[in-house]
Image (cartoon, grey):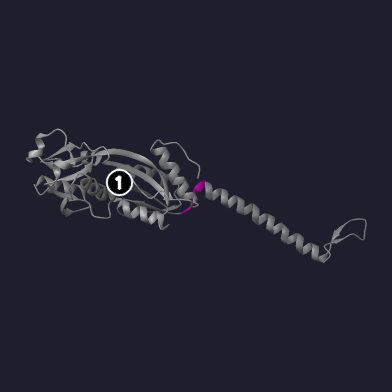
């Protein structure tokens, strides 16, 4: 099919050439519009972001970050999915949640991320417990105590149980709860003892209880922000991670 008429001194378009030219102009215009749209998407981070957060973690670390993120990116549909840290890690690995927060260790073959918080755990015991005379406890000191712990889907519970077994006993768990204040209140009533991260324990009402540090250095609350390995993150997810790094005073990262 001939597109150009070269029979005269001036080259002109044939009827077919005019159609090709008109369509080519539309393609160029559409490509320019596509580039502008993608640049706007990258800048504004529009879209949906599902963020997996354990209930106990969100209120202590992310309330200000969520507020600032929504002010900067108002068009992002931010959906917070609340589960225990272990379940959040599973959802991220399965690609059902794009970004989440979990407790180390996690499967680094499927997930990547960065640690943003690290602190030891303390034992919360009734103030009239015989162990209250000690300045520091070993897990072995707690083998005859009744435990009030988080439900099984919480990574912190699994970590506590594992370290107790390393100390030579399986904890006698009599109550499971995801509510920190209820757990501490039950301890104050003499029902049992619990283990909590230092910072979480300090924010609780410690009336009637005593918080004692543990000697086990391996028993630490190491929180990580995670996403699926080798997965192309949305602009909303990338912007969230960047804002989180700034808020948590961590170096930037390329994705």
Question: Please, is residue 141 above or below residue 230 in the view?
Answer: above
The one nearer the camera, 229 or 19, is: 229
Question: Dot 1 surroundings within 10 Å: few (below 14), some, or many (20 or more)?
Answer: some
The residue drawn where x is 14% and y is 41% is 141
Magenta region: 43-47
In the picture, measured across the screen, residue 120 lies left or right of residue 68, that is left
- What SS does tag 1 mark? helix
**Where is residue 125 shown, x and y percent of the image?**
13, 42
Find residue 215 and report its image quarter.
top left
- Residue at the far top in the pictured view: 135
**Where is residue 77 shown, x and y percent of the image?**
42, 54
**Residue 44 lies in the magenta stretch:** yes
In the picture, measured across the screen, residue 230 lies left or right of residue 20, that is left
In the picture, measured across the screen, residue 58 lies left or right of residue 7, that is left
The residue drawn where x is 18% and y is 42% is 139
Provide the residue designation for mark 1.
57
* Residue 205 visible in this rendered orientation of the protein: no
* Residue 235 visible in this rendered orientation of the protein: yes
Quarter of the picture containing the N terminus is bottom right
């Amino acid at each position: 099919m001939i597109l150009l008429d070269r029979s005269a001194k001036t080259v002109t378009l044939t009827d077919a050439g005019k159609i090709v030219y008109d369509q080519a102009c539309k393609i160029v215009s559409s490509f320019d519009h596509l580039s502008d749209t993608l640049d706007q998407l990258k800048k504004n981070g529009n879209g949906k972001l599902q963020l997996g957060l354990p209930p106990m973690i969100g209120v202590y670390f992310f309330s200000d970050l969520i507020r600032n993120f929504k002010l900067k990116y108002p068009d992002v549909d931010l959906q917070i999915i609340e589960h225990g840290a272990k379940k959040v890690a599973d959802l991220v690995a399965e690609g059902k949640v794009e970004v989440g927060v979990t407790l180390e260790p996690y499967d680094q073959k499927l997930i990547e991320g960065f640690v943003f918080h690290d602190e030891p755990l303390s034992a919360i015991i009734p103030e009239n417990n015989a162990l209250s005379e000690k300045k520091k406890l070993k897990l072995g000191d707690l083998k005859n105590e009744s435990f009030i712990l988080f439900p099984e889907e919480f990574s912190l519970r699994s970590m506590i149980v594992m370290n107790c077994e390393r100390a030579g006993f399986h904890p006698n768990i009599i109550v499971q709860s995801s509510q920190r204040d209820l757990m501490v209140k039950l301890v104050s009533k003499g029902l049992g003892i619990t283990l909590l991260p230092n910072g979480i324990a300090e924010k609780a009402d410690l009336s009637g209880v005593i918080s004692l540090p543990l000697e086990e250095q391996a028993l630490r609350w190491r929180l990580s922000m995670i996403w699926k390995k080798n997965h192309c993150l949305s602009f909303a997810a990338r912007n969230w991670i960047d804002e989180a790094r700034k808020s948590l005073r961590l170096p930037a990262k390329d994705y």
